[in-house]
Each structure stands twice: as C-alpha cells, then as structure tokens.
Image: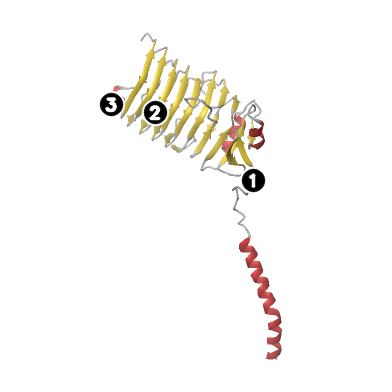
Amino acid sequence: MLKRFLTYSSRIVPPVLIAIFGIVFLVRASPSATTTNVGENSTTPSVIISGSLQAKTGRAATLVVAASNGTQSSKEQADFVADGRDDQVEIQAAIDALSSSGGTVQLSEGTFNLSSGIVISSDGLTLKGQAGQGGNKAPGTYFETAIDQPNSVITVNDIGREVQAGITLEDFWIRNWGNGDGIVFGPDSAIFDSRIEGVNFLGNAYHLQSAYSFHSSVATDISITNTGIGFSLGGSKRSVFSNIMANDLFDGIFDTQGTLEELVITGVVADLNHHGQVLKMPASALKRCQKIKINTFRSSATR
C-alpha cells in the first residue's frame, strides 16, 4: 500500500507544483490594476498645445481645455473643447473633474467667451494659460466677458472653509467689458502660499480682491488697464507684489483697510488719470510694510 501511494504521488505532485508556480509567476508579472503608464512607450495619447508637449490625456493631475478658435491640433488632443459660447462650462468641468487635492487645468491659446464666472474651491489648483511673446509675458489665452457686479470672472472660495492654499493663476488675459471684478478671493477664505503671475487685466471694477487675507503669496508680472482698483486687500502678511504695470486706474493700485505685515511692493509703473493714489491704506498699516518701491509714477489727477 505504501509503495503504491509513493508511486502515485511521484506522478501527480510535480505537475501540480509546476501549475502552482506558473500561476504565481503570471500574477507577479502582471501590472497592478491601479498602475497607469504615461511614459514615452505608453499608448495614452499625448496632448500637444502650440507645438509643445504639455500633458498626457488620462493623467489625473492635468486636464487640457481648448478654445473654440484654438488650433486644430489643440482641439483634437484636448480633454475639453469650448464652443465659443458659455465657455466657462468646459473650464469649470475640467476644474471639477480634478480631485480635491488639486491639479492643473491647462488652457490652449485662443479666446474663451464667458457668460458667468469660474469658481475654484480646492487647494493646490493651477489654472494656466498660454504665454505668448513680449516683454510683459503677453499671453495667448484670453477670457472675454461682460460680467457685472456683484460677480467676478474668477472666484477662489470654498464655502465653509477658512483657509485655502496653493492656488496658482498664470499667463492669461481677463478682458471684462462689464463692471464685475477680475479675481476675487471669497469673504470666508484666507489665502496662503498662492501665486498670480503673468495675468493681464483690461476693465473690471477690481483686479484682485481679497476680503479677508492674502498671506505668504506672490503677485508678479501683472498688467492692469482701465480698472477701478488694482489690488483690494482685507489684510496681508509676508506677501510680495512685483513688476506691476498700471494704466488708467480710477482709485489707485493698492487699497486696504486691513492689517499689513512684512509686505513687499516693488517694480511698480503707474500712469493714473483719476484719483492718482498708488497706495490707499492707513498710516499705521504703511509702517508695517517691509519694502515699498514705486519705480515710475505719473498722474493727471486733480487731487
């Protein structure tokens, strides 16, 4: 009996072991279901904007929106394509499709026609246009709108939260023929570690309005034309405003009634035709500013 069992085992066990080994090998060799390959050999299509690689479709951290008058290549490769009317719908859809931890919405060259504003309500989000040629980083991405008060073209706000961080707005024009605001940080939001760069404003009641606070943030390479007030800050701490070009502002570049600490303002070129106030803030607030340097100031104001 024992001899017969050993003989039977010698015939069965090796094939079984081979089968088990093969299954284990296949499982270990297979890629994880949660792994996404977006490298050079990936079958995931590339997104090409203005002739340069910007992102891979399918990468959750970056979504691309093409303007209706953008290039055909941009439209074919984008995640969202605007139709030239109510283009905030496609931009907002891209913003909302990103996770709550943020990501990048890359806009193509061209004009986005907005009938209402765009809302950013998550940390770590970047809204980036296409930088064109020119000394002031004249961008090739335009927001065209006629939004009136109390609305704004871009609102950064998360209802029920007090702190929002890591917002980047970069390389686009806001041309507003209404009297609404350009960028508004909501009344309940304290903005930290954020950046506004290469943004150009034409029209708007306010270029940038922060009703509560604007801390440890940077605004640089900004052009403001035919606007009511450039920056209206509820308060600011350790923030930097640099390379600001202002033309034909009604009531000054900087307006605040809040607390300012370690504020740096430098590289300002102002050509104002109305009230002519570069800084409109309490004297006590000025004393707490770390550095203020106005490079050029011209005004035809009567007071």
Q: Nearer the viewer, residue 68 or 204?
A: 68
Pinpoint residue 22: horizontal percent, then vertical percent.
66, 68
State how far apart marks 2 and 3 are (Cα).
17 Å
Q: Residue at x 57, y 23 (%)?
A: 144
Looking at numbered disc 2 in the image, what kind of residue is underneath it? Phe
Pinpoint residue 303: horizontal percent, then vertical percent.
35, 10
> In the image, which is nearer the foreground, mark 2 or mark 3?
2
Q: Residues within 10 Å of mark 2 (few under 14, many from 20)?
A: many
Q: Nearer the viewer, residue 68 or 159?
A: 68
Residue on which the image places disc 1: 44
Pinpoint residue 283: horizontal percent, then vertical percent.
29, 22
Residue 30 lies, with reference to residue 70, above or below; the image says below
Q: Which of pointers 3 and 1 lies earlier in the amino acid sequence? A: 1
Left-right relation of 289 to 163: left
Residue on which the image places disc 3: 287
**Which disc number belongs to residue 251?**
none
Q: Which of pointers 2 and 1 lies earlier in the amino acid sequence? A: 1
Write down the quadrant of residue 217 in the picture: top left
Write down the quadrant of residue 252 in the picture: top left
Q: Which of pointers 2 and 3 lies earlier in the amino acid sequence? A: 2
Looking at numbered disc 1 in the image, what kind of residue is underneath it? Thr
Q: Residues within 10 Å of mark 1 (few under 14, many from 20)?
A: some
